[in-house]
């Protein structure tokens, strides 16, 4: 299992949403700041698009730090493994060749830049990122223990801060406490945790 998460955003309102929604979950630390100023950690998740075009938002900050070669390697993985379009809800790990953040997870929240408000795509992308890091640790010599995450889907995606934090926390909670059986009671409980907040349903 992963040891913990670093949740980063420059705005206090988003950090407050992170603290509220992740309250009580172990190994979580909220950092108000920019990606470029993050402390060393094992892996950062980039909330990109399905085509690996990393020219705006948090993606652009990542490329400024790691270099354009990383974007080209991500695009080649997308072409080789996904026939040129990586579905939302999938993720993969790539080495960065950077001394303080050695790995990156590419986990698209959207096909192309645009609103994903009212969907569960933030959950799907966060869940995929956590599973990709976990799968990496099963076979890799250099483990991923601490994962850095931005506020998924809140830029071009237009997802409100609190809703993004809620879906991200649901994914982490499910990662920490996987089911011991699969039946409709488990499915309904899980679905509600992902798609409902009070009386409001998030469309799929």
Image (cartoon, helix red, strand yellow):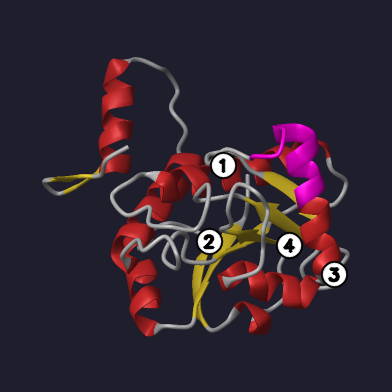
**Can you identify the residue that label 2 sits on?**
27
Q: Contact, CB < 8 Å: mark 1 with mark 4? A: no
**Can you identify the residue that label 1 sits on?**
128
The answer to which of marks 4 and 2 sits earlier in the sequence is: 2
The answer to which of marks 1 and 4 sits earlier in the sequence is: 4
Relative height, residue 193 to residue 158 (above, below): above
Where disc 3 sits, the SS reads loop
Where disc 4 sits, the SS reads loop
The answer to which of marks 2 and 1 sits earlier in the sequence is: 2
At x 47%, y 42%, the residue is: 124
Query: Along the horizontal axis of the image, is 142 left or right of 159?
Result: right
Relative height, residue 186 to residue 36 (above, below): above
Of labels 2 and 1, the one closer to you: 1
Residue neighbourhood size for the residue with mark 4, other residues' Cα within 10 Å, grouped as few (<14), some (14–19), many (≥20): some
* Distance from Cα at disc 4 to Cα at disc 2: 14 Å
Where disc 2 sits, the SS reads loop
Of labels 4 and 2, the one closer to you: 4
The answer to which of marks 3 and 1 sits earlier in the sequence is: 3
Residue span colored magenta: 75-85
Residue neighbourhood size for the residue with mark 2, other residues' Cα within 10 Å, grouped as few (<14), some (14–19), many (≥20): few
Query: Along the horizontal axis of the image, is 204 left or right of 110?
Result: left
């Amino acid at each position: 299992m992963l040891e913990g998460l670093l949740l980063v955003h420059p705005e206090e309102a988003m950090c407050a949403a992170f603290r509220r929604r992740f309250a009580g979950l172990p190994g979580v630390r909220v950092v108000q700041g920019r990606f470029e100023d993050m402390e060393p950690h094992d892996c950062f998740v980039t909330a990109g698009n399905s085509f690996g075009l990393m020219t705006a938002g948090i993606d652009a900050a990542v490329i400024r730090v790691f270099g354009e070669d990383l974007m080209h390697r991500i695009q080649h993985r997308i072409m080789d493994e996904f026939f040129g379009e990586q579905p939302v809800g999938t993720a993969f790990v790539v080495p960065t060749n950077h001394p303080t953040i050695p790995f990156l997870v590419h986990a698209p929240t959207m096909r192309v830049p645009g609103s994903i408000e009212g969907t569960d795509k933030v959950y799907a992308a966060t869940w995929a990122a956590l599973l990709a890091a976990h799968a990496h640790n099963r076979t890799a010599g250099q483990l991923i223990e601490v994962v850095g995450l931005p506020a998924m889907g809140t830029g071009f995606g237009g997802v409100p801060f609190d809703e993004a934090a809620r879906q991200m926390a649901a994914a982490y909670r499910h990662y920490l406490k996987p089911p011991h059986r699969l039946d409709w009671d488990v499915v309904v409980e899980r679905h509600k945790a992902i798609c409902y907040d009070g009386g409001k349903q998030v469309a799929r």
